[in-house]
Amino acid sequence: WLLFSLLKHKSKISVFNEAETIVNERMVGSISYNNRVTNWERYIILRNEIWIFLKSTNTLNPEMEAVLNQTIFDSVRFVFKIDPKKSVNLYEKFVKNKFIPVTSEITTKNYLVLYNLIGFFMTEKIRTIITR
């Protein structure tokens, strides 16, 4: 989000190639773990905002658009594992009738065959049953 905000406001950015970050990893009570659905929702919304910004500035090329769309789709699919109802809502808002998903690291050709035949919800339900 920070990098996108800086780029959106045409800020000058410098790159420093040495890692100097201190990370505090908690074993319990992690915000990232406790709010997984909310975190994924923010991730999806940010990618959609990036898509909108690039489109509005005429800098969205077909390759970037395909990557952003597929990233959103794959993320919505991931949310289904945690909260199917939220996933369906995100699908309706950010995916349905906006683009056609393609194969990716997590979306296989077989998945897409089912998806095109019976839709998102039923394909995810079947996948959930098979992977249990």
Image (tube, rainbow, N blue to C red):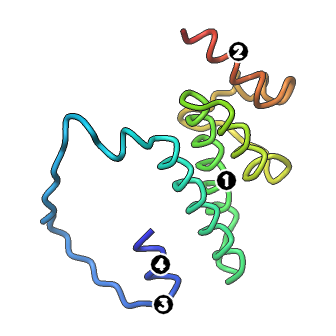
Give SS at disc 4.
helix
Q: Residues within 10 Å of mark 1 (few under 14, many from 20)?
A: many
Which residue, given by chain and number where applicable, does mark 4 sit on?
5
- Label annotation for residue 23: none
Q: Earlier in the sequence, mark 3 or mark 4?
A: 4
Which residue, given by chain and number where applicable, does mark 1 sit on?
69
Give SS at disc 2.
helix
Q: Is residue 1 left or right of residue 121?
A: left
| Quadrant in which residue 108 is drawn | top right
Dot 2 amino acid type: Ile
The residue shown at (45%, 68%) is 1
Q: Earlier in the sequence, mark 2 or mark 3?
A: 3
- Label annotation for residue 126: 2
Answer yes or no: do the residues labelled 2 and 3 have beta carbons within 8 Å? no
4 vs 1, front mark: 4
Q: Is residue 115 left or right of residue 12?
A: right
Quadrant, the C terminus: top right
> Residue 8, relative to residue 105: is it above or below?
below
